[in-house]
């Protein structure tokens, strides 16, 4: 079998190769095919959404899909298969296991400029991931300009972990990111984390909390909270959510809700009902970390993002099941296998270890998202996401180093059918490394993989 990342649903190889000449068909310029690719593109086949059929024979090279996203995904496969302007004879029938296949990038702990975010979008699109969750606010920084609240960026965006200044996106910058992602069939999922992780907002507007606080440059969590019983808090949330919803064409808006250790249980439940209700009025599907499943008053369809371990602590599993009980679904992101900021074995250059780390490529691969929590199987899962927090990372090169190659394993969990062997995966990954080299993607050349030089 010719190795493809992520592993396709079905692949039957033949003998020989077929030289590529020029692209043809009415869609030939649609998706940026590299020059020299002689591929007939067509829409309207019987494939599932996002899926494709690639047929390479001596007579023709055809790529067929039901939608443009499927064509784009097929082209990512063609990029992997092409050697010396030729494709191997093969037939691939492929489609995603989950609709939501995501990566998360934390731009709050360390600010990353627009060009770094767009580079990461290119990186994840190569893996057929289709959502980028942007963690836009935290204790260390508020990263999006909001009209009428200038101090959010004047003060709240002025810091990051370890000092050295911060930064923020104008709404035009954010729109540029959204448009760039859409061209690659990636949906932006913005997160405004609350009621905890809010020191940056409170440093800008003390009335949103218990009073004046200093900007924060450390990495501790759980110490901040919005003023839960103040109507000024909900006026602020309404303004932020209204503006964010207006510039976010995708269906999802993430409201955080994790590690609200400075908020009492009663206040937390009151806050979640108020805040999610505000966001739902602006037509978005709410996403929150699984802690918000403590509430039994979530808007219809609310999505919970599970971040505990592959062997769940009891309360975390119960809170996650709450989303299903209320008619919602779950994104699976177990920290011990899917958090890309955990250290690798044998190198502590970057990253943390709190999530039962270090985390190897084998750890990232040998789990199944439908087997983590009883009662949360394929039907209850919206999908899978690989978060990457930036307490120890300040450049896109460092981000890529921590993401690759483990994000490749998570992408396969999100796209490919259940099963698959680690040995087969690492054999395909070794070949995939050549494409990462060609595209100048920085990655950790772990000794777990026999990389091809």
Image (spheres, helix red, strand yellow):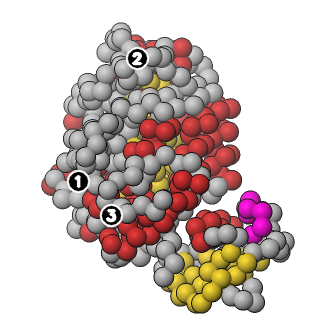
Q: CA distance from mark 2 to mark 3?
A: 35 Å
Q: What is the number of the mark on residue 166?
A: none
Give the residues in magenta. 32-37
Residue linked to disc 2: 163
Residue found farthest to the left: 314
- Which residue lies at the image location 23% right of the left edge and 53% below the top edge? 309
Q: Which tag is nearer the camera, tag 1 or tag 3?
A: 3
Give whichever of discs 1 and 3 has the lower sequence position: 1
- SS category of the residue bearing label 3: helix
Q: Nearer the viewer, residue 441 or 180?
A: 441
Assign a secondary structure to mark 2: loop
Position of 86 relative to 413 (above/below): below
> Mark 2 to mark 1: distance in Å?
31 Å
Q: Is residue 188 magenta?
A: no
Residue nearest the observer in this picture, 214 or 234: 214
Q: Nearer the viewer, residue 383 or 21?
A: 21
Q: Where in the figure is residue 202, as x and y percent of width and height? A: 40, 18
Say which residue label 3 marks: 365
């Amino acid at each position: 079998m010719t190795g493809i990342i992520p592993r396709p649903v079905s692949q039957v190889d033949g003998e020989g190769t077929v030289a590529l000449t020029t692209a043809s068909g009415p869609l030939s310029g649609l998706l940026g095919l590299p020059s020299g690719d002689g591929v007939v593109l067509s829409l309207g086949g019987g494939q599932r959404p996002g899926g494709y059929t690639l047929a390479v024979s001596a007579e023709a090279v055809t790529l067929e899909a039901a939608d443009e996203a499927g064509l784009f995904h097929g082209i990512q496969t063609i990029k992997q298969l092409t050697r010396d302007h030729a494709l191997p004879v093969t037939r691939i029938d492929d489609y995603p296991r989950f609709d939501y296949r995501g990566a998360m990038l934390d731009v709050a702990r360390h600010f990353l400029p627009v060009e770094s975010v767009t580079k990461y979008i290119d990186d994840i699109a190569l893996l057929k991931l289709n959502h980028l969750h942007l963690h836009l606010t935290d204790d260390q920084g508020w990263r999006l300009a909001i009209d009428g609240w200038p101090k959010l960026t004047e003060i709240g965006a002025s810091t990051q972990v370890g000092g050295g200044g911060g930064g923020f996106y104008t709404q035009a910058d954010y729109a540029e990111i959204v448009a760039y992602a859409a061209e690659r069939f990636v949906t932006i999922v913005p997160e405004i984390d609350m009621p905890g992780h809010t020191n940056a907002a409170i440093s800008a507007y003390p009335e949103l909390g218990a009073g004046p606080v200093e900007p924060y440059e450390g990495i501790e969590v759980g110490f901040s909270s919005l003023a839960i019983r103040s109507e000024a808090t909900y006026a602020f949330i309404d303004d932020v959510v209204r503006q964010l919803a207006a510039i976010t064409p995708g269906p999802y808006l993430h409201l955080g809700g994790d590690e609200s250790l400075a908020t009492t249980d009663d206040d937390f439940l009151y806050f979640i009902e108020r805040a999610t209700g505000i966001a739902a009025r602006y037509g978005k599907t709410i996403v929150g970390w699984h802690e918000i499943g403590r509430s039994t008053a979530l808007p219809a369809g609310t999505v919970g993002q599970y971040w505990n371990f592959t062997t769940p602590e009891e309360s975390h599993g119960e809170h996650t099941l709450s989303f299903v009980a209320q008619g919602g679904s779950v994104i699976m992101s177990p920290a011990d296998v899917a958090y890309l900021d955990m250290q690798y074995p044998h190198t502590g250059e970057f990253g943390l270890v709190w999530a039962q780390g270090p985390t190897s490529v084998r750890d990232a691969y040998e789990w199944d998202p439908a087997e983590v929590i009883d009662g949360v199987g394929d039907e209850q899962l919206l999908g899978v996401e690989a978060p990457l927090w930036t307490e120890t990372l300040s450049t896109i090169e460092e981000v890529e180093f921590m993401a690759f190659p483990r994000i490749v394993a998570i992408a396969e969990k999100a796209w490919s059918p259940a099963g698959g062997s680690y040995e087969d995966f690492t054999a395909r990954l070794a070949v995939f490394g050549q494409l990462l080299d060609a595209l100048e993607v920085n990655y950790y050349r772990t000794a777990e993989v026999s990389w091809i030089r």
